[in-house]
Image (spheres, rainbow, N blue to C red):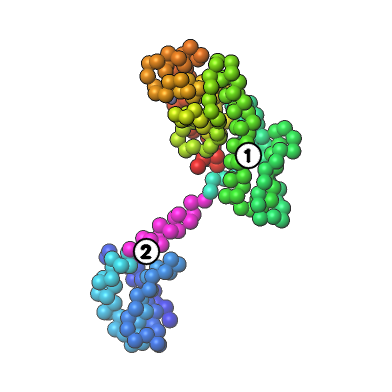
Amino acid sequence: MDSSGSDQDGMPPYRVRTSLRAIHVRLQVSPAEGLTVIVPRGFDLNRLPAIVEKKKTWVETHLRRFAAAAKSRSADPPALPETIALAALGESWQVEYRPAKTARVGVRSAEPGRLVVYGAVDRPSACLAALKLWLRGRTRETLVPQLIHLADSHGFKFREAVVRGQKTRWASCSARGTISLSYKLLFLENEAVRSVLLHELCHTVVMDHSPRFWALLTRFEPECKAIRKGMRGAERRVPAWAEG
Ligand SMILES: [Zn+2]
């Protein structure tokens, strides 16, 4: 037996349910129905506002938690891409999603410019993970050789190159000479990428950003400061699906 809710001043709205089995008044909070007050048969409903008032903080805390949980559930993964433009390589890929009866998702390029995402393609997060793995591989195939070529032609030495999906940095160079490249570099113009690669290679000689560092970089990249300036806000070129 439901009766309609009440919405008095500053009071959470609630519905009242009479229960034949209830002995005491009971408050129940659920994500779907909000606050329900269960009362024994014959209970004087005029007493309810005072009872609810007393439990107000408890009720509001729970309602807030439910709302927060619902919000985080509805934070959908970003939409899957239909095309992928890799500015650094001058490549554009059409993406096709092909369902197959398997729990995993794979990516393969059947022909240049065409990418097939296959498998459990109804799982967006699995598709995103597979596409990021593909970006990583593409970076390894293209930007790492470019880094090696630049190092060879300018006489730099580094220990190894690794590809990651760093959140905030395009690339970095450790004191031990490991250069990390973010696959997000693929979304930048090649001039910017080349400048980032040279920047890290110069760090194999000068670790900090002292005048000595800039003097060294300027020798290989006279426009390095202008290019760096032009890269402000370049993170926006990275599509949402490739983030994180
Ligand atoms: Zn630096």
Q: Amino acid at mark 1?
A: Trp
Main SS class of the magenta portion in the image? helix
Answer with the quarter of the image where residue 29 lies: bottom left
Q: Secondary structure at mark 1?
A: helix
Callout 1: few (<14), some (14-19), or many (20+) C-alpha neighbours within 10 Å? some
Horizontal side, residue 47 vs residue 80: left or right: left
Q: Is residue 85 visible?
A: no
- Write the residue at 28% across / 71% down: 55
Q: Position of residue 219 (x, y in %)?
A: 48, 12
Answer with the quarter of the image where residue 12 lies: bottom left
Mark 2 = which residue? Answer: 63
Q: Position of residue 17 (x, y in %)?
A: 39, 79
Q: Position of residue 166 (x, y in %)?
A: 49, 37
- Write the residue at 53% across / 25% down: 158
Q: Amino acid at mark 2?
A: Leu
- Write the residue at 48% across / 56% down: 73
Exactly how many numbered labels are in the figure? 2
Horizontal side, residue 188 vs residue 6: left or right: right
As for residue 65 lying within the magenta part, the answer is yes
- Write the residue at 40% across / 15% down: 212
Q: Camera-side residue: 190 or 22?
A: 190
Tell me where the magenta segment starts and ends, as one range. Answer: 61-76
As for residue 178 lying within the magenta part, the answer is no
Mark 1 vs mark 2, foreground winner is 1
Q: Camera-side residue: 231 or 195?
A: 195
Ligand 1: image quarter: top left
- Identify the image quadrant of the N terminus: bottom left
Mark 1 = which residue? Answer: 134
Along the polypeptide, which appears first: circle 1 or circle 2?
Answer: 2
